[in-house]
Image (cartoon, rainbow, N blue to C red):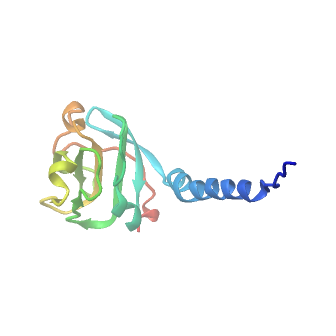
Amino acid sequence: METHKDISVGPIIAGVLLVVLVVVVFIILPNMLQPTTSLRLGDGIFRARIAANEADRTKGLSGVTQLNSDQALLMAFPNEDKWNIWMKDMKIPIDIIWLDKNKIVIYIVKNASPENSASKVFDPKTPAKYVIELPAGSVDSKAIKTNSTAVFQINTEDIK
């Protein structure tokens, strides 16, 4: 005579739902809630995520494995300073652009690669208010130059 143990599927379903909830709350939701803006610079138009607080600026593009040619990260700082960029935990090469308070390009680093820049810090020669990270090659392909003016809208009250 065979005996079958009843396996309760309730705890299994609860476990799966808990995993899904954790993924939504800690991974999907924060990315959906981060504000975005349309950014025009040189010949390019980019969909830029806005990093307007210290936590988002510190994270930057760390861990990102792909950045489409029309994507960017726009870091907005509360004041002008010589804000530096560190390639810690970067997976892709990027172009880095610093803008002053008038959204004019004041400094550019092309093709900052994680392989040769993981411990290097990039910083502008003069104070900046904004830093833009674009896919490597964007500066050349979109004719972005020093003294170019960026066009974007950002709620300055959100910058912390």
Residue 64 visible somewhere in the drawing: yes
Q: Nearer the viewer, residue 145 or 96?
A: 96
Specify the quadrant of the image occupied by residue 66. top left
Residue 53 visible somewhere in the drawing: no
Left or right: residue 27 compared with residue 116: right
Number of marks in picture: 0
Left or right: residue 117 compared with residue 10: left
Left or right: residue 81 compared with residue 62: left
Specify the quadrant of the image occupied by residue 10. bottom right
Q: Is residue 44 above or below residue 95?
A: above
Q: Is residue 130 above or below residue 38?
A: below
Q: Which quadrant is home to the C terminus?
A: bottom left
Q: Nearer the viewer, residue 130 or 112?
A: 112
Q: Nearer the viewer, residue 105 or 97?
A: 97
Residue 104 position within the rendered picture, expressed as x and y whole percent measured from the top left: 23, 49
Residue 41 position within the rendered picture, expressed as x and y whole percent measured from the top left: 29, 39
Q: Which residue shows up at 34% across the image and 55% down it?
A: 62
Q: Which residue shows up at 73% across the image and 53% down it?
A: 13
Residue 97 position within the rendered picture, expressed as x and y whole percent measured from the top left: 23, 49
Q: Residue furthest left?
A: 125
Residue 107 position within the rendered picture, expressed as x and y whole percent measured from the top left: 16, 51
Q: Residue furthest right?
A: 1
Left or right: residue 129 compared with residue 5: left
Specify the quadrant of the image occupied by residue 128. bottom left
